[in-house]
Image: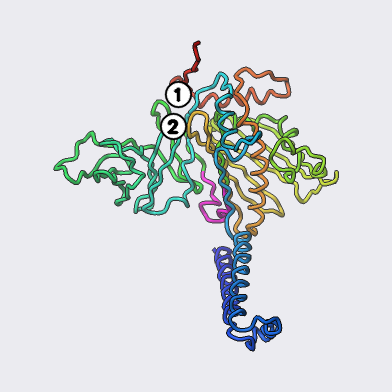
Amino acid sequence: MELCSLSVFVKVITVMVISLAMGLVLDVRDASDMFIGVAYPELWRKAGLAGAPARAAACILAGVCLLALGWLYRLIFAPLELLRTADEVGYIAEDGRSRAQAANEVRRRRKTGELPPVYPNGWYRVLDSHMLDRGDVKNVTLLGEQVAVFRGLDGKAYVVDAYCPHLGANLAVGGRVVGGCIECPFHGWQFRGEDGKCVRIPYADKVPEFAKVRCWPSCEVNGMVLVWFHCDGVEPSWRVPEQKEITRGEWVYRGRTEHFINAHIEEIPENAADIAHLAHLHTPGIVSGVDLRYTNSKTWEFVRHDWKVEWNPEPDPNKHCSQMLVKHALTVFGRRWPLLDLDVVARQVGPGIVFLLFDHNFLGRGVIMHCVTPVEPLLQCVSHTIFYQSSIPPLVPKFILRAECIQFERDVMIWNNKTYISRPMLVKEDSAIQRHRRWFSQFYSENSPRLRYQHDTMDW
């Protein structure tokens, strides 16, 4: 609490100093005015900028200073938020084509392969808690469905099907929160968030018992609203663990990234077991960027990342979890910098949530919540939300998140352009990949939905 108060105090003082400085600059009325004891307006007189020109120059200077100070304030204090569109990363636009055109062409021509079911059973992130205030309603697409996410006036978050069972209006588009219910914008039917039951129809004497909207099992933990999906409607068989430091406010929100990836969901967590790809794809320094055509450029080869990784599933009662232990070292001109050595524990919980836990003597402690949520069968929304020690300057976790984003976008370029191979050609050093596939198969059941498509042909 004391650290939080100190942070707020520093921000208030910063704003006051900026406001005072701008006020003094804008208060120049005449070239004979004195500014903090320094007669720089006299210089304006010699330059012919006295009177109205001086005020105009002061306004321009104030504007430039405000922009610069605003940028500096965001750099130091504001959370880092990088939200990528579906065609912004991972595609090569050549021959005058736009990225969107290149992305559409890749999606249309790519072989999908023999795919596993597209929606594994488990918990998935819907959105971050801070994005949903009391009385807010959000429209979200996940698992091929439209849902309405709203926070009741009691502060609890609810997730229901977006379409009203009456005549199909979207509850999240114009709907409003009434107590713990959501009201349809079309006819005013009110549905209770906790069970989806309709509790009021403005023009009807009685509400039918069968009048209800589907209510998704949900919870709110670690600063996220989550929903449970099971193809057979089975109730949750495990829970997402609470990160106590987030709940107690010791670790605070420092930013998030968001990417949309055109791949099967299993491709993304499988990277944890693909140990060999780290040495090839992620060894070049982050300064060499994300375009795989240039990451191995000799210009930046003096900066290298070294990785040692081990992946293993956890035993009962946590068989739905696995762990990747990562040891990272940075070398510059062949010299290792021990101060930047970093050990990370990546604990995957179910098919769609990973805790990336950092613990460093100098850089502090924190977690990146890596979440994969299927939007459609071959479109995944991947978010990385970082919570870090409040006593550590925000620049540190923001740099970590930015560096992680660069490494992740290299993977995105692979995922967006690859095909899924159900029977891959592996060598003995790839054994962890096969073990990961066996572990991940527990999230599929007999009725898990599969991708169904018609291959169009042209008969001449």
Left or right, 40 with respect to 128, comes to right
Image quadrant where one finds the N terminus: bottom right
Relative to 20, residue 460 above or below: above
- Residue at 43% from the left image edge and 50% from the top image edge: 132
Q: Which residues are magenta?
A: 242-256
Q: Is residue 49 magenta?
A: no
Looking at the image, the residue that sits furthest to the right is 334
Say what amino acid the circle numbered 1 marks: Pro
Image quarter of residue 142:
top left
The label nearer to you, 1 versus 2, is 2
Relative to 106, residue 387 above or below: below
Can residue 38 be seen? no
Say what amino acid the circle numbered 2 marks: Gly
**Which label number is shown at residue 85?**
none
Q: Residue 411 in the image: state x and y as whole percent.
A: 65, 35
Q: Residue 355 in the image: state x and y as whole percent.
A: 58, 41
Can residue 336 be seen? yes
Q: Residue 456 in the image: state x and y as whole percent.
A: 49, 17
Left or right, 22 with respect to 204, comes to right
**Which label number is shown at residue 144?**
2
Q: Secondary structure at mark 2?
A: loop
**Which label number is shown at residue 449?**
1
The Cα atoms of the two marked residues, 1 and 2, are separated by 11 Å
Looking at the image, the residue that sits furthest to the top is 460
